[in-house]
Image (cartoon, grey):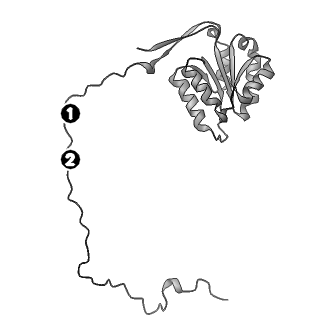
Amino acid sequence: MAKCIIMSNRKRIAIVAHDNKKEELINCLKPHRTVLAEHELFGTGTTGSLVEKELNLPVTKLQSGPLGGDQELGSMIVSNGIDILFFLVDPLDVHPHIDDVRALLRISQVWNIVSATTTSTIDFILRSSEMNESHIRNVCHLTQPKAIIVKNLTKPKVSVQEPRIPIVNTKKTRIQLPRLSPERKQPVLQQPVFKKC
């Protein structure tokens, strides 16, 4: 049985953007300022400060992503403190905290929250009629897994191999190495590599 979580008409929206995506995020959010004003906003580090400054809306600011902000948001998602995640990831840049980014996106999927990683999706969500209505989301991972019954199994045959016994030279004979050809006076390693001109 899935757990039903009710999102109220006042949504809790987390807003995150990597450095090269912050301007794109602000340009996407500005036309939706009136919609966002009706909801509770959260943001990591400079993204939260930037949204607060540019849109003149209150934003609860968390730590910067590399300093644990992504993990803070993940914790809030698990405790049902976030309903929607807007996360603009820069796919063309290297991020030292990429594991935190992946973990946050994974948690948003596990807990089935509304999430967007592109400005087109953010725009679509903010234009939705469901933004100002309560909504039920199902979290299916909380159900017990069904047992699978497998019939007619045969045991696999296991072959036992004889242990390998190393061959030991018991006669203490010397190994003969091939002799050098008569044309080659010196071993290869002792020949000069460069000739003088």
Return the x and y of residue 37 as percentages of the image width and height: 73, 12
Label 1 neighbour load within 10 Å: few <14, some 14-19, many 20+:
few
Q: Tag 1's secondary structure? A: loop
Q: Amino acid at mark 2?
A: Val
Of mark 2 and mark 1, the one earlier in the sequence is 1
Classify residue 96 by image quadrant. Answer: top right
Specify the label residue 153 is tagged with. 1
Say which of 125 and 64 sits in front: 64
Q: Tag 2's secondary structure? A: loop
Residue at the (40%, 18%) spot, across then down: 143
Label 2 neighbour load within 10 Å: few <14, some 14-19, many 20+:
few
Q: Amino acid at mark 1?
A: Leu
Q: CA distance from mark 2 to mark 1?
A: 15 Å
Residue at the (27%, 82%) spot, across then down: 172
Return the x and y of residue 86 as percentages of the image width and height: 65, 23
Q: Which residue is mark 2?
A: 158
Compared to 100, does 188 lie above or below? below
